[in-house]
Amino acid sequence: MNVLDAADLTVRYGGSVALRDATLAVGAGRLVAVAGANGAGKSTLVNACAGWSRGHASIAGDVRLDGRSVARLAAYRRARLGIQCVPEGKNVFGELTVEENFALVPAVPREAGRHVFSREDVLGLFPRLHERRTHKGSALSGGERQMLAIGRALLAGPRILLLDEPSVGLAPRLIFDVLTVVRRLVDDGLAVLLVEQNVSAALDVADELYLIERGRIVGHGDAAAMRQDERIAQAYLGGLAEVEP
Ligand SMILES: Nc1ncnc2c1ncn2[C@@H]1O[C@H](COP(=O)(O)OP(=O)(O)OP(=O)(O)O)[C@@H](O)[C@H]1O
């Protein structure tokens, strides 16, 4: 059974459709990437799975967590059940230290299917955060804030992690570091849905990739196969030169 299933998700902002009939699945221990141009609907898709939207949107379709529909549940209830979303923007409490940011996350029950991390686990995954654990959120670099945001989601006991553009604004080395940690989590059994503008970096760590264009999913396949997809190669990988003959 998949950890997350989205079926025929449609999101409308007033008269305009930002996402139409999107269907995707994320299994346990799978890293599923979503790629697409600016405005294609990637954030809309991830946010709809988490149960929220940026503006006054109407959301139709089903979202199932471990086979149970959560489509009628508010975002906070989905989060409590284990749909942990890290939205774009590296949102952390700037006036609180790293440790205080962690302390605000309530303890979660150890239940089957939940991946429960301790503070020590998170600081072990992100040694830079360990070094800066007494620093305020506002004093952290963009990469460190991203690690803190992901760390908070891990403390909340995810069944699935939804990551929206974790690499935005990060230096290549940090992108590699963050995505390497994400891959380790997946290898330990976590399900991850990753929106990533750096498609090359995403394909290096992902198992599968969905391609989204103008609100529609127009392609899906294993990462290796999608790397060979002409649309991906031309738009995101610097032309056909990278496609093997
Ligand atoms: N609050 C809103 N009100 C109206 N339209 C919106 C709103 N939020 C997003 N949209 C529109 O929905 C479409 C999808 O936006 P979305 O943010 O999901 O794209 P994206 O693929 O994540 O883009 P980016 O890579 O730039 O973050 C866009 O046309 C956008 O303008």
Image (spheres, rainbow, N blue to C red):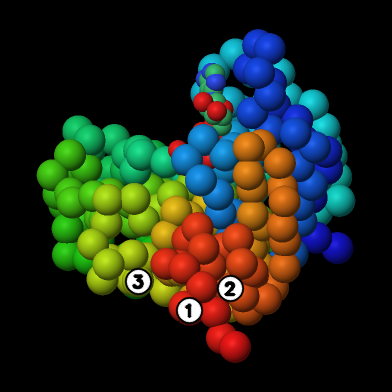
The residue shown at (82%, 32%) is 61
Q: Is residue 155 left or right of residue 18?
A: left
What residue is pinned by disc 2? 227
What residue is pinned by disc 1? 242
Above or below residue 44? Residue 12 is above
Which residue is nearer to you in this view: 187 or 48? 48
Quarter of the picture holding the N terminus: bottom right
Quadrant of residue 28 in the image? bottom right
List x then y, in percent, for residue 207: 63, 73
What residue is pinned by disc 3? 176
Q: Nearer the viewer, mark 3 or mark 2?
A: 2
Q: Nearer the viewer, mark 2 or mark 1?
A: 1
Quadrant of residue 206 in the image? bottom right
> In the image, what residue type sits under mark 1?
Glu
Counting every numbered tag in the picture gives 3
List x then y, in percent, for residue 51: 66, 31
Counting other residues with Cα less than 10 Å from the Cα at mark 3, is it few (<14), some (14-19), or many (20 or more)? some
